[in-house]
């Protein structure tokens, strides 16, 4: 009888690094979901266009400070023209994602908007089939159907209210998820290899610039969402800076996690954002999760889990905004 070759144990250093990466992933999700909660607080006072400029201007400030520090240490270089072009193209989609998601936060509960955001992997599979000619098997089509059914369950209570009510928020959240999937497919198509601090700097900077024309319309009394321009006081300024700081820190933590652990290990951790969204929604906005949210979220999780099991690099989080 031949002796079986024992599988070598995972080195302690590698296992420790993966655990650390998973810890950073959990921290990133908690931070970025808290950022979304901060933005939802803003939606009670400011319009979507103004929040876009506030969020990305603050994010750009902290990203710039980080970038200058790393540039001085020789850790990053100046971006190339190709990097600028790629980042600008992605930022167009990011502004669509953020604008729709921020509007959704103004009219529907935080946990419901977060749950609908998790349909992004379903759209990634669909867009990968349409744009990148990637094959889609029957199991994936079933997963897409299950996930979209979950969206229907969550939003079913709003169909009788008309488009001006909560239904517009559910539609906006779905559009945000689809646009985010398109942004990820575009990133894959470009095969972008820029350092994370550079990508954050360019994305926040371009996004703030792209949102400025919509802010100008708001100042002129022509807001897209009907909410007028409001001057910032010191309290809102500190919250805006806090949101920008959380966004930069969260993205850096997530980047570290994906650098030191496989996406297959980190993917399931992203679902903790549903728990954080429910937690923040309850304590900050008195939002109590209902049966529709629980059932719909379960269907979305099942659908996205099937897709993520097949395609390990389909990140889900809308926190990228």
Image (cartoon, helix red, strand yellow):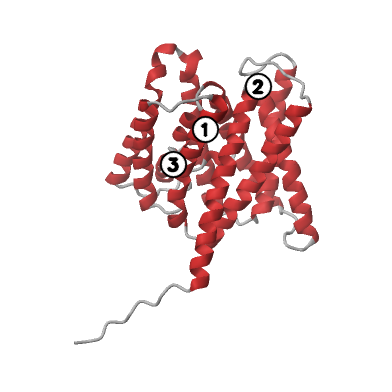
Residue 140 percent coordinates (x, y): 32, 44
Q: Residue at x 45, y 34 (%)?
A: 115
Between circles 1 and 2, the one closer to the viewer is 2
In percent of width and height, residue 159 lies at: 40, 16
- Residue beneath disc 1: 176
Is residue 52 or residue 111 the one in the foreground? Answer: 111
Residue 221 vs 173, above or below: the answer is: above
Contact between marks 1 and 3 (CB within 8 A): the answer is no
Mark 3 burial class by Cα count in 10 Å: few <14, some 14-19, many 20+: some
**Residue 174 visible to the viewer:** no
Q: Residue furthest left?
A: 1
- The residue identified by callout 3 is 127
Earlier in the chain: of badge 2 and badge 3, it is 2
What secondary structure is marked by label 1? helix
Q: Is residue 245 above or below residue 238?
A: below
* Upstream in sequence: badge 1 or badge 3: 3
* Left/right of residue 95 with respect to residue 71 in the rendered view: left
Q: Which residue is mark 2?
A: 47
Q: Secondary structure at mark 2?
A: loop
The residues bearing labels 1 and 2 have C-alpha atoms spaced at a distance of 17 Å
Tag nearer the camera, 2 or 3: 2
Q: Quadrant of the C terminus?
A: top right
Q: Give the quarter of the figure containing the N terminus.
A: bottom left
Q: Residue at x 39, y 12 (%)?
A: 160
Horizontal and vertical percent position of residue 261: 50, 60
């Amino acid at each position: 009888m031949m002796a079986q070759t024992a599988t070598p144990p995972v080195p302690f250093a590698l296992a420790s690094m993966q655990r650390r990466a998973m810890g950073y992933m959990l921290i990133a999700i908690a931070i970025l979901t808290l950022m979304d909660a901060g933005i939802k607080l803003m939606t009670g006072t400011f319009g979507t266009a103004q929040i876009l400029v506030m969020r990305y201007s603050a994010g750009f400030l902290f990203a710039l400070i980080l970038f200058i520090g790393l540039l001085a240490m020789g850790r990053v270089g100046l971006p190339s023209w190709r990097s600028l072009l790629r980042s600008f193209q992605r930022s167009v989609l990011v502004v669509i994602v953020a604008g729709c998601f921020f509007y959704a936060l103004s009219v529907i509960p935080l946990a419901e908007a977060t749950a609908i955001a998790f349909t992004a992997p379903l759209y990634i599979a669909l867009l990968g089939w349409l744009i990148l000619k990637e094959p889609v098997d029957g199991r994936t089509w079933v997963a897409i159907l299950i996930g979209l059914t979950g969206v229907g369950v969550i939003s079913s209570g709003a169909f009788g209210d008309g488009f001006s009510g909560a239904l517009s928020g559910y539609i906006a959240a779905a559009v945000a998820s689809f646009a985010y999937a398109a942004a990820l497919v575009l990133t894959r198509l470009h095969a972008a290899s820029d350092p994370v601090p550079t990508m954050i700097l360019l994305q926040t900077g371009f996004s703030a610039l792209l949102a400025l024309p919509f802010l100008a319309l708001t100042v002129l009394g022509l807001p897209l969402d009907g909410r007028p321009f409001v001057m910032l006081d010191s309290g809102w300024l500190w919250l805006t800076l806090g949101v920008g700081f959380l966004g930069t820190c969260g993205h850096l933590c997530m980047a570290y996690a994906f650098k030191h652990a496989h996406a297959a290990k980190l993917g399931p951790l992203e679902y903790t954002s549903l728990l954080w969204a429910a937690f923040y929604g309850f304590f900050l906005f008195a939002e109590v999760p209902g049966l529709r949210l629980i059932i719909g979220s379960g269907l979305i999780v099942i659908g996205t889990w099937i897709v993520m099991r097949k395609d390990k690099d389909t990140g889900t989080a809308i926190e990228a905004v």
